[in-house]
Image: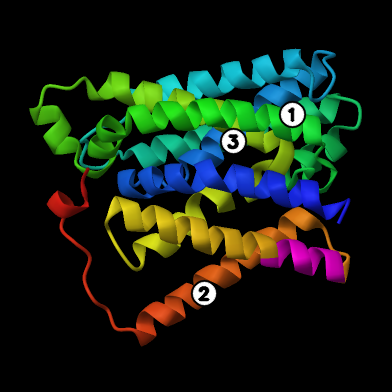
Amino acid sequence: MELMLPALVAALLLLGLHAYLGIHIIARGVIFVDLAIAQMAALGWTAAVYAGFAAGSTGAYLIGLLTTLFAAGLFSVTRMDHPYITQEAIIGIVFVVASAATILLASQAPRGAEHVEELLTGSLLWVTWPKIARIAVVYGLLGTLHWLLRRRFLTISLQPQLARSAGWSVKVWDFLFYALFGIMVTLSVDVAGVLLVFSFLVIPAVIAFLFTGRPGRLLAIAWLSGSAATVAGLLVSYWADLPTGPVVVCAFAAALLIASVLRRLTGPGSLPPAEEAGP
């Protein structure tokens, strides 16, 4: 319990905000933006270590944050209506380039290979209570901002044409959304790693969208399914003495499989139209 309780609290804390933002990411159709921004954060962390900053230091965090804010600015101006070039293509390019740059920097840094592995799988099992407290404070502030701005963000994510017809500056709001997203990811990658952060964000939201299109119900299903998968993954990791991050990722995959089977058994049904799904 002394070893697993901090990991459980940290994982559920990360899941709380990630599952909500995952609904936005799925609705926007930019599924891999989390991987791209997480990899940009990893690039920033690696650059900081290469420059001599200690992993987990304030300087390393600020460098990681700068790289994610750069990605936020890039993604806010690349939402386009081009018939062939989609935003997902830009996101894929950013992910590949950031991954290659991370590997190049890590190859020149002390313990580079170990550093890359930690960025992928995280160090969830070794998270400390002071770090959990810092994450809770930042996530509380981010969650408050998202609550205050929820109508704008939900409308732009679920009904972008309505936002444009209302005269909103979608690019400015997109930058704010991705900037807040980048702050969250920069913190979570250091604890959970790129793979688990992606699972927290996308899989609970996908499970929720299998059953409903209403924001309130989406969030409830995402939180419940994500929490169940997190607890199950940590228990299996403890009992089988396996690496925590990869086991939790596999638990999320199992939860998605179970939800897909359940959805088929209950019939195809129908999701509410966009007008009903909006705020």
Image coordinates of residue 47 in percent, x first then y, are 73, 20
Choose mark 2 or mark 1, whichever is in front.
Answer: 2
Q: Amino acid at mark 3?
A: Ala
Label 2, label 1: how many angstroms apart (C-alpha)?
36 Å
Which secondary structure lies at badge 2? Answer: helix
Q: Decide which of tag 2 and tag 1 comes sooner along the chain.
A: 1
Image coordinates of residue 127 in percent, x first then y, are 80, 40
Choose mark 3 or mark 1, whichever is in front.
Answer: 3
Q: Which residue matches tag 2?
A: 257
Q: Which residue matches tag 1?
A: 104
Label 3, label 2: how many angstroms apart (C-alpha)?
25 Å
Q: Nearer the viewer, residue 59 or 95?
A: 59
Q: Which residue matches tag 3?
A: 38
Locate residue 273: give its quadrant.
bottom left
Q: Residues within 10 Å of mark 1 (few under 14, many from 20)?
A: some
Q: Which residues are magenta?
A: 232-239
